[in-house]
Amino acid sequence: MPKDHGIGASPKRREDVRFLTGTGNYTDDINVYGQAYVYFLRSDMAHGNIKNIDTSAAEAMSGVVKIFTGADFEGVGGIPCGWEITDKNGDAMQEPAHPVLAIGKVRHVGDPIAAVVADSLEEARNAAEAIDVDIEELPAVVDMKAALEDGATKVHDDLTSNLCYDWQFGTETADVDAAFAGAAHVTTLELTNNRLVANPMEPRVAVGDYNRAGDHSTLHTTSQNPHVIRLLMGAFVLGIPEHKLTVVAPDVGGGFGTKIFHYAEEAFVTFAAKACNRAVKWTSSRSEAFMSDAHGRDHVSKIELALDADNNFVGLRTDTYANMGAYLSTFASSVPTWLHGTLMAGNYKTPAVQVNVKAVFTTTVPVDAYRGAGRPEATYQLERLIDKAARELSVDPMALRRQNFITSFPYATPVAVEYDTGDYNATMDKMEELMDFPGFAARRAASEAKGMLRGRGVNCFIEACGIAPSNLVGQLGARAGLYDAATVRVNATGSISVMVGAHSHGQGHETVFPQVVAEMLGIDEGMIDIVHGDTSKIPFGMGTYGSRSLAVCGSAMVRATEKIINKAKKIAAHLLEASEGDIELKDGQFSVAGTDKSVAWGDVTLAAYVPHNYPLEDIEPGLEETAFYDPANFTYPAGAYACEVEVDPETGKVTIEKFVSADDFGNVVNPMIVEGQVHGGIAQGIGQALLENCAYDENGQLLSASYMDYAMPRADDLPHMANYVVDHSCQTPCTHNPLGVKGCGEAGAIGSPPTVVNAVLDALNSGNHDVEHIDMPVSPSRVWEAMNG
Amino acid sequence: MHMSDSREINAPTSEVWAAILDADVLKQCVPGCTEMAGNASDGFDATVVQKVGPVKATFKGHVTLSDLDEPNSLHLAGEGKGGAAGFAKGGADVTLTATENGGTLLHYEVEAKVGGKLAQLGSRIVDGFAKKMADQFFNNFKDAVEGPSEEGDATEETGEKKKGWLKRIVS
């Protein structure tokens, strides 16, 4: 019988009470008395030299407080990149300056040129129209391969070229070449991982405030990691020490990665609030979000797989161009390298794997992590390629995968990571069962009777979550540690506030984290609240991304709670006049083993704060503990996904009839929330596979900057819930964190795109259309062209 | 985008040539034009109000003429800034060829591009819009040069517009 509380139960999300009743507190709900508003004048050219900015007419307009341009930020640091990549020659990546407001040049449509601070947003916007900007247009740099040709227009004049780095990783070239030379069959595939815009429901907002009396700056912002913003903005951009800067990320309406990064607008409002001695607020419009939120994906790859005569994978080689956009966003450089290359082995025991990545500057919006960040790109290449190999060799795609699975753990891949545990056949078996393989032939026949083509696609994936061991990522170029922290504050009456570094913006931490503490202490979850998102309230935290919250911050919380239990046992031992070693904690009662003597949780906590009868000579009063947790390894969730699609040969439209995911997330704390995370991730993956595409024209103009042109998935693009099956019953617990959890936030977005594309190609080939590949989004026009071209 | 088309205008090339260089004619012919000032040697300053899909904007721009080979060909280049709506810029190569019946064959090759919000919101409709603008311009131009067709042109309200450019100036 399912549990009704603690770990493994599915209580409803407590945060939803406020979200569903309109009583959440989002950044745009925050208004500071007397605040001014900023409107950013953004470049509508992709690339150009700024010849002159005349703000005189605008400054004279009503309501204008001050107009800022790049010149006002001379002496102020630029937006930093958090990860230095070393290229294959041992040289550091090329790292261009990233000014808060453009200096000298504009480098993408949306690059901020000037910022108007005014009494109202309308006045700021009107004044921005009156700014006369003279820009000498330069050729746009859009195509990555062309950008690397000799003589190509440079995005950054002070760099030697548009190449950020040329990275190579994995097996030595000679060994990979030997594997290919000896292969019985080589399958090659060229593909594009389409550029996406994250589109969280809440656009970005930032409110900067400055208190002259205390020389203290406060930034309210839509961030997934307020401490990271405090660190980057305080130390690298504005030079504000931590004790003079508070960053608050209140309720945040979705992030999907794009709210990890430190953005120019955050630095601007903090800077301007001090300069104007007045709070300054910025609220992004949806149009602005399209051209200022970091984009995702945008890789162009060639991947080759070598197989021996028995269809064993013997070598894998990739060559990827990764778009960085115009500047290096916070974690942009790590996505195509350490978050992508290290996963290229997938679930397979391929002995030789080499990854090559060229990161390229273009005159487009910066590209950074988006749900999955590097792992979807790796999975998509590998799983599309294996499907193609199976078709070329006329073997069952399931059998080909199973034959090459890693089956013993721990397993060190040729691309540096060591999988601690897993059972890929188990998730494959579960997926096969849920997908009803035996019934497929009849379903295909039924579809064909209607004039439709039916296809089934399968996919396996592995991801690295819970980033990360700090000493390891430090060696790889990360400029920060990636531990997390939690403080468990037990109050006198026994209620608990847990201050956690992980930020919750849709993940349900406020529900899940108390389940863990309640389970450990044996008390009611209702006695525990989570505090997050405010650097003045929480000890520290590296934030929420990479499916790390429970695995890393949750582990810190477990460690802090263990410290609480140890201290509480000392207090209980004193109250019970027993030896500490004999004290047991069960169901919120401390008892002396083998006796009926016990003291309740609330009595112990009260004694800690009213220490009249208390071992003051041994321990301090109070009951509050903090723990920092630095993981020993990544976690490695894995899964097997499948879907069945119908393709209408008349129109090329793809309909997803059924989708099944079988994931191994290790232990699961709240099954309902895990299922919700996977449902959402798959929906985003289906969006990438069928609908979403961020398009630029050859002039660097952003063409898909509204929901008229950027197609988001809607409910009717997804299968009905009865055919949208999410399973997490295969569980190999993580071996190195105290909860045995692996992380579930990104799996759906990683595993679903190749599943869908494989299914579409299976459908087309079943109708005797010999189609090898269609790039995402697999839109009706692309499918129709592939069938009829 | 690239557009090209031809119009046969029932007027000699010299008359067509003169019309192209006239600010009043241009104002009359550019769809949505509210202001047009200047001359052939300095160029023209224009204000045009247009709605492209969801974006309505006032474009202020400057048009320059170059490569003038009277009365055979010239190049027009223009750029209009629409503030928050973005920009439109383009160029047109216009050639005039005398026809056997004393008229003029006007041929144009237009290169145009848009940027900013116009591209972001209107990219799917901008090609069609530009084609329509060009068609309207050259239709208006043909009408302006030719003047009203002979007696029997019934549409009263267009009567004044149909009055030929040269005739209006001399009358």
Image (cartoon, coloured by chain):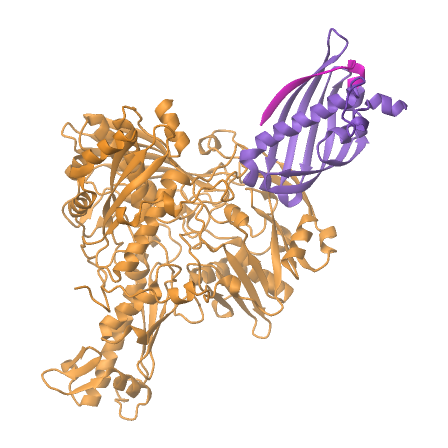
Chain colours: A orange, B purple
Would residue A621 be found to the left or right of residue A347 on screen? right
Residue extending farthest to the bottom is A612
Is A199 rendered above or below residue A147?
A: below
Is A545 rendered above or below residue A375?
A: below
Residue extending farthest to the right is B171
* Magenta span: B1-17
The x and y percentages for residue A681 are 34, 49
Would residue A587 be found to the left or right of residue A273 on screen? left
The x and y percentages for residue A621 are 31, 85
Q: What is the quadrant of residue B7 in the picture?
A: top right
Residue B40 in sight from this viewpoint? no
Is B165 rendered above or below residue B37?
A: above
The x and y percentages for residue A180 are 23, 28
Q: Nearer the viewer, residue A59 or A541?
A: A59
Figure quadrant of the C terminus of chain A: top left
Q: Nearer the viewer, residue A285 or A784?
A: A784
Q: Nearer the viewer, residue A446 or A365?
A: A446
Say whether residue A714 is magenta.
no
Figure quadrant of the N terminus of chain A: bottom left
Say whether residue B12 is magenta.
yes
Q: Nearer the viewer, residue A156 or A122?
A: A122
